[in-house]
Image (cartoon, rainbow, N blue to C red):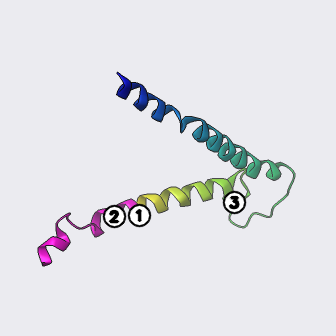
Amino acid sequence: MMEKNDSQQENNLPRRPKIILWGILLFLCAASVVPEFFLTRKDYFGIDGMLGFYALLGLTSCVALVLLGNLLGHFLKRSEAYYQERL
């Protein structure tokens, strides 16, 4: 009975910091778009004049890097016994 309560407490402890970090992240994302209402930019390619273009570009680049890293991880990983086979 005590083990179940201990595991529930461990699961609830990191919840508040996660909520705070997500709140900070959402605030920073919104804060990066707000200046675009007040600034005028010269668009060079047509699409880069769109509201929030640079925020979307950053998000797309980040997602692409994570997916590429995940794909590379599948190609570069070794079996768990890789170093033991050499001995």
Are circles 2 and 1 on residues that touch, CB within 8 Å?
yes
> Gap between marks 2 and 1, in whole Å?
6 Å
Residue on which disc 3 sits: 48
Q: Residue furthest front?
A: 2
Q: Residues within 10 Å of mark 1 (few under 14, many from 20)?
A: few
Q: First in sequence, mark 3 or 1: give its number.
A: 3
Mark 2 surroundings: few (<14), some (14-19) or many (≥20) residues within 10 A: few
Which is more toward the observer, 7 or 45?
Answer: 7
Where disc 3 sits, the SS reads helix
For label 3, the crowd category at 10 Å Cα-Cα, with few meaning under 14, some 14 to 19 and many 20 or more, is: some
Bounds of the magenta span?
69-87
Tell me if 16 is positioned left or right of 30 in this view. Answer: left
Which numbered circle lies on residue 59? none
Instruction: Work out how far the residue at label 3 is from the one at label 1, CA to CA, in angstroms.
Output: 27 Å
Q: Residue at x 42, y 58 (%)?
A: 67
Type of the residue with mark 2: Gly
The residue pinned by badge 2 equals: 73
